[in-house]
Image (tube, rainbow, N blue to C red):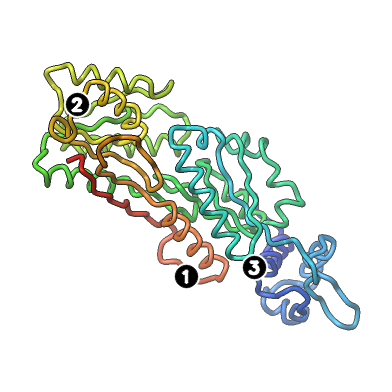
Amino acid sequence: MAILKKSKQVENYLRNAIVTGRWSAGSMLPSERELLAEFGISRATLRDALNSLCNEGLIIRKQGSGTYVAETTEHRQFAITGSASCISSSLGYWHQDILEKAQKKVAAAGYKAVFWIGDSTSLSSFLESTALFENSNIRQTVGVFNNVCIEGFDQKLAQEGVPCININHGVPVGKYSIVLDYAELSDRAAQILKSHGYNDFMVMCEPTRAFSNDSVIRQLQTNLIQLYRRTVDYDETRLLTVDTTNGFHNVYERFKEVWASSSRPRALFFFDDAFFDVASRAILELGIKVPEELAIVTHANVGRTFHFPVSLTRVGFSADDVIKAAWNMYQQVIDGREIDSSVILIPPVVKHGDSL
């Protein structure tokens, strides 16, 4: 990561202090003497920083009076990033919910929420597909909720003095991360099934191999594979894997295949709610009685709706919980408060139904 000049560091700090309310519009900044003492820098370095902010229109320097925050400013923009591929995926409803809840939280705090939706296959491709880092945009940005799973993004923002909270991932993706606790999700699902006497339940999940070249995605895949195995007490004959690289259409045939076999399950945990969404069509087509013939627990985040005649026992996450945790962490960062942990795990929510 590039090392910023001292004047740029001071500039970034002052900008963030102004846009986050340390000095309100029209108020006078501390004197040069006070700022020099606070930062321990040379007068030339401080003036370089102040000149940049003055040219930007964020502050006004009045000869013989002092330096003031501009009376009118649009420098209270909060960025929310997203991935076009994620929004259009099987979990698109979840990503849309995250973006909507983030926008409401940001607006309630008095900021203008600006969405940057791009191609997140890599940092370079995301930057090329959005204009977030253009000067006029990044200078107005007071913070970022990063909903794209790419390394180095928050470091890039840190160079501009913009705090970033990474959200909606199963592994940490930067310095400050809100992480969905999939380990707790799988444990809760297993406990529920075992408490109903289904000790040999099966799990429908992705194949047990990590294939991504991206280090973050690969780490998430590796973690999930370990969870699949642990959920079935490392008896891999109880893993009903389906390759969804090219979509979820294989789920329908895979379910019908296993139901017609001698290894037909008595109970099934769908690790991905998109698996259940497709498999439910086969369940209804075959006339399978739930829970008399097949007991079901499915991963399903708060907000997901299924058109199924039996209410489902579900284990998933709440977008409200994610955004609340992210906002609290952001407030701690900009207030300079000590943070107990830079990674916060979001526990799952259990909704009991009639499918057991």
Residue that badge 3 annotates = 20
Q: Position of residue 208 (x, y in %)?
A: 29, 28
**Residue wearing tag 2:** 288
Give the image quarter of residue 63.
bottom right
Q: Is residue 144 above or below residue 82?
A: below
- Amino acid tagged 1: Glu
Q: Position of residue 187 (x, y in %)?
A: 22, 46
Say which of marks 2 and 3 sits in front. 2
Dot placed on the residue nearer the N-terminal end, 2 or 1:
2
In the image, is residue 260 above or below residue 129?
A: above
Q: Earlier in the sequence, mark 1 or mark 3?
A: 3
Mark 1 or 3: in front is: 3
Amino acid type at image mark 2:
Ile
Q: Secondary structure at mark 2?
A: loop
Do tag 1 and tag 3 residues touch (Cβ < 8 Å)? no
Q: Amino acid at mark 3?
A: Thr
Q: Position of residue 332 (x, y in %)?
A: 51, 67
At a point 63% along the width and 47% down the height, the residue shown is 115
